[in-house]
Structures are given as C-alpha cells and as structure tokens.
Amino acid sequence: MSDARYKIVFEGELMPGVALETVKENLAKLFKSDASKIDSLFGGRPVALKRDLEEVEADKYLAALQRAGAQVRKEQDLAAGFSLVETEDHPNPETLAAVEAEQDTGTMTCPKCGHEQARSVECQACGIIIEKYLARQAQLAESAQATASAVAGTATSPYATPQAQVGEALPQYCELRPFGITGRIGRVRYLAWSFVFMVALLVVIGVGAGIGFAIHPVVGGLLAAVLGIAAIVVSVQINVQRLHDIGWSGWLYLLNFVPIVGSVFPLLLLFIPGTTGVNRFGPPPPPNTTAVKVLAWMWLVIPVVFGILAAISIPAYQDYVERSEMSSYEAPADGEYAEPTEEGEYVDPSESADPAEAEAPADQEEFESN
C-alpha cells in the first residue's frame, strides 16, 4: 500500500491581523504569478494550491503559506491514488483477457512487434525482454499524462499549481533596523533600545553642546538644536516599530501630543504584547538576546535606584539648609547685640558711637582731678 498523499486547500480566508493587500502581495511573490491570477483565488471557493504531496512536504507548504497570511489547510488527496496506468495488481480487462487466452493456448504475443510464439521471457522476433518493455511503457505513459495535465492546467486555469519552492521565500524573522520605520520590535527590545538611546543622547548632547558653547554661544545653541532634532527622529523610529509589532499604524505615535492621552499612550507600548506570527507589517522580530534583556532591566532598575537616592539625599539637604539659616540668627559670643540702623543694617554698638563722645569720660576725669 502506498503512502498517503495530501493537498493544500485555500478558500480565500486570511490569518488574523493580516491585511488583504499584504496577503496578495506575499502570494504573488511566492507563486511568482500575476496579480490578476492571485485575485481569482479570493472568490470564496475551495482551491487546491498544491496536490500529490507527502506529509512532510505538505507541512512545509502549509507553514510557508500561513506565514504569508493565507489561512490554508491540509487535506488528504484521494485523487492522487487513482491512475489509469495498469499495474500488476490491477491490469486492464483487455490485458487480463489476453493473458487468460495465452494461458489456455500456451502461446503469447509480443507487445512490441506482435509476433506469436511459445511462452518465453524474450521475443524471438525483435529480441526484447517482455517484462522490462512493459514496465518501461507504463512509466512513459504515466510521465506523459502528468506533463499533459500540468500544461493544460497552466494554460486554462488560474488555479495552476505553483512550481516554485515557497518554503524559504518568506523570512522567519524580520530584519532589525534601529534607524528606520520598517520592521517590528517587541517590548523587551523596545526598553533596551530606549535605554541605549537615552544614554547616547545625554553623552552626545553634553559633550557636543559643551564644546559648542566653549567656542561661541551661537555655535552651542545651533549644535544643541541639531542634536535635539536628531533625537526626536530616532525616538519616532523606535516607537513606530513598536507600534508595528502590536499591529497598529505608525501614525498613532501622534497621540503622544494629545493632552491626557499622551500621558497614557507610552504605557500601552510597554504593556501590550505584539501579534504572534506575520502581520501586515512583516514577520515577527527575532528572539531577544542576553544583551537585550540586560539593557531592558537596566532601564527599569536605574530609575528606581535614582529615586531611592533622591529620597535619601533631598531631606538631608533640606535639614542642612535649615540648620544653616538657624545658625545665622544666633547671638555673638560676648553677649552684645548689633543695633539696627535706619537702612536696616546691624552695626556693633562700639563702632556706632561718636569719637568725641567716646573721649568724654577721660576729659571729665582730668577736670575733676584739677
């Protein structure tokens, strides 16, 4: 008994989250066919995209077409087991009758030249080996029938079986492009890229603006403006790729500039998972590496560390300021207090006295002694 054969059936249905135009473009690339023939596949009728496949080969086609966005299924191809070519187990009625007649008479007829002779494995007239000749003729008839069916199907039917191998046409993962708006990135890679971007931004702006302001304030201002615009562009690219992974359009990034909504929208990018499999923006991103996971955790841990340090240092600094203010209002060590002047300044009493008044007691003592 021969192994079971399978076929791939498509009824025009799409995988979840994939646009119709994207599926048509992917199928046109895989089948290397015109768009008009691909459009005819979406009529709602079952179409066998591939027939007479082994189970392993059928699974390969099934996975490739599903990655392209087409919702296909695998069915057993019962028609593949039928053949009009006679075999040893199922001979034609004419052959069976001829064999029975030959068995009755003890003679045989050569299938090539028609020479009648006594039963033998070799024809005495043309010299062929009869069994090999019959096997060769059956093989030629089967291959000719398959070729004729393929040519007729290609010429008359828009549902022609694709001849190209479609297993490797669509990549399993998308290409990572940090400086582009195409492709997809997951939540962990989004955190890692954001951390690297912020660190690089602080370093570049600090060094570049410092050098620019050292040269001239105008140069420093222009350099800071250019770096700021570049930072905005890179930030938009990273966020757009994260939106693509969710299955949303990159234009939704503009919601960050809407009041109230803009404060919640970044949290959605952090918590909403991406779509599994292919969506209208391409294949899924590759798995996260160890470096990506470490950078993502650093982006989460560093703000917490800075928050703890701020909670400790800010109260200590406020206490230091209060103690400094209190010490400025304390009295001098000799117990004398400064007297305020008309302008609000405090002056030492010994310094505010008139010199003549300060010398008065000495003159009075001299007068009394006389």
Image (spheres, grey):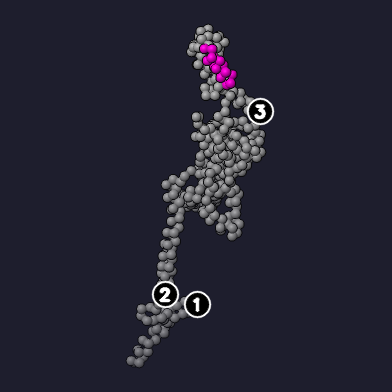
Specify the amino acid type for callout 2: Met
Whether residues under marks 3 and 2 lie with C-beta atoms below 8 angstroms apart, the answer is no
Q: Along the polypeptide, which appears first: circle 1 or circle 3?
A: 3
Q: Position of residue 173 (x, y in %)?
A: 50, 41
**Picture disc at residue 326:** 2
User: Which range of residues does the magenta coloring cover?
Assistant: 92-106
Q: Is residue 266 above or below residue 340?
A: above
Residue 214 visible to an observer of this rendering: no
Q: For the residue labelled by badge 2, is the local secondary structure a helix, a strand or a loop?
A: helix
- Seen at 60% across and 59% down, the residue is 259
Q: CA distance from mark 1 to mark 2?
A: 23 Å
Front residue of this view, candidates 8 and 231: 8
**Percent position of residue 102, x then y:** 54, 14
Check if mark 1's residue and mark 2's residue have beta carbons within 8 Å.
no
Residue at the outermost left position: 369
Of the two numbered discs 1 and 2 on the same chain, state the one appearing first in sequence: 2
Does the magenta run of residues contain 310?
no
Mark 3 and mark 2: Cα distance apart in space:
100 Å
* Pair 3/2: label in front: 3
Amino acid under disc 3 = Thr
Secondary structure type for disc 3: helix
Task: Please state which amino acid type lies under the numbered disc 1.
Answer: Glu
103 left or right, relative to 304? right
- Residue at the disc numbered 3: 156
Residue picked out by circle 1: 343
- Label 1: how many Cα within 10 Å (few below 14, some 14–19, many 20+): few
Mark sitting on residue 43: none
Q: Residue at point 62% right, 35% down?
A: 47
Q: Percent from the top left, x then y, of residue 183?
A: 54, 43
**Residue shown at 41%/65% (left/top)?**
312
